[in-house]
Amino acid sequence: MKKLTNEFLDELVTECKPYSREGEVVKDIPGQDAVDQNKLGVCIIDMNDQVYSAGDTDLRFTLQSASKIVSLMMALDDFGKEEVFQNVGMEPMGDFYNSISHLESHDVSKPFNPMVNAGAIAVAAMIKGKDTDERFNRVLKRLRQITHNNSLKMNQEVYESEKRKGDRNRSLAYFMKSTGAIAHDIEESLDLYFRINSIEVTTTDIAKIGVFFANGGLCLRTGKQLIPMHHINTIEAIMMTSGMYNEAGKYAVEVGFPVKSGVSGCIVGSVPGRYGIGIIGPAINEKGNSTAGGELLQRISRQLELNIFSVIRQQKD
Ligand code: GLU
């Protein structure tokens, strides 16, 4: 087994960079259009708050779909598992993240799971607050606590673009309104969804989210239990089955711990009891996952032996 060091990560980043040529950068996210598709960065934080990193860790990007785990965390904390899963399913969908057909062909009373767009909009609709500002500020405040980054904020230009170009998401939301799957105000729910998608981060910020989950919702620095552990277990299980769009099965096999990607090319990984991982590699494949980032994640898992199933067996030997 390899030892986690900055040099080890440096080598892996160099090895994996060429995989960025197999993907493409999403051009319609403002700012992303100018990003060099060969960028690749990784940050890993362990349970002693020790940070390891390599590559383009200063790159700023928006959470996009990685925000779905944050919204789910907020809704679970606000309402608990039972009520949340009355509004959204927990089964993997096995189709594109913004699929419309599955809303009608499956169970019209609720979308498949919180990791696809329809499910994430339904989840955002639940987050408590008197108006969209208050609801968004609650999310931001929680994220700032988790990342220890008080300057974390939404990228206004990305938000405006998400809103302007959000017709696909709007159609998902209005369909859910028509079937009664969402009872809240649709435009407000969409607005909150777009804002949360547009929160700007670095690999360090998302590695902090990963390590917070890895630590079962306990803040490493303050020792405070910010979210009950059973909610984190639920989120991690859903990341494992649905976090990588319709490549979730491949990642469960090849990586073997909970991960969630976003179309900005980011990946949040959480190795329970061990590490939080943040990766950015802006070139993504047709399924929506970073090509170089995905390769890097697989190599990290293999070489550091992070697959949670083999960890369980190693402990038994
Ligand atoms: N803003 C994108 C959307 O809502 C996010 C998609 C993603 O990262 O998967 O369609």
Image: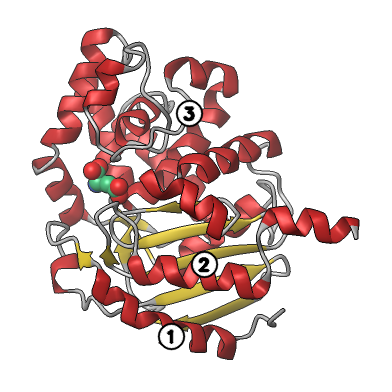
Q: Quadrant of residue 133?
A: top left
Q: Amino acid at mark 1?
A: Glu
Where the C terminus falls, by quadrant? bottom right
Q: Position of residue 93 (x, y in %)?
A: 39, 32
Distance (Cα) linking label 1 and label 3: 35 Å
Decide which of 291, 278 is in the foreground and name it.
291
Q: Look at the image and tell me whether residue 204 can be seen.
A: no
Lateral position of residue 167 relative to residue 152, left or right: left
Which dot marks residue 91?
Answer: 3
Distance (Cα) linking label 3 and label 2: 24 Å
Which dot marks residue 7?
Answer: none
- Residue picked out by circle 2: 298
Q: Residue drawn at (24%, 27%), measured in percent from left and top? A: 188
Which SS class for mark 3?
loop
Q: Position of residue 127 (x, y in %)?
A: 42, 28
Mark 1 and mark 3 lie on one chain; the one further toward the N terminus is: 1
- Residue picked out by circle 1: 15
Q: Amino acid at mark 3?
A: Glu
Mark 1 surroundings: few (<14), some (14-19) or many (≥20) residues within 10 A: some
Mark 1 and mark 2 lie on one chain; the one further toward the N terminus is: 1
Q: Amino acid at mark 2?
A: Gln
Which SS class for mark 2?
helix
Decide which of 38, 203 is in the foreground and name it.
38
Q: Residue drawn at (69%, 59%), measured in percent from left and top? A: 220
Label count reads 3
Q: Is mark 2 within 8 Å of ligand 1?
A: no
**231 over 293 or under it: above or below:** above
Q: Position of residue 308 (x, y in %)?
A: 69, 55
Mark 3 surroundings: few (<14), some (14-19) or many (≥20) residues within 10 A: some
Q: Position of residue 145 (x, y in %)?
A: 54, 53
Mark 3 and mark 2 lie on one chain; the one further toward the N terminus is: 3
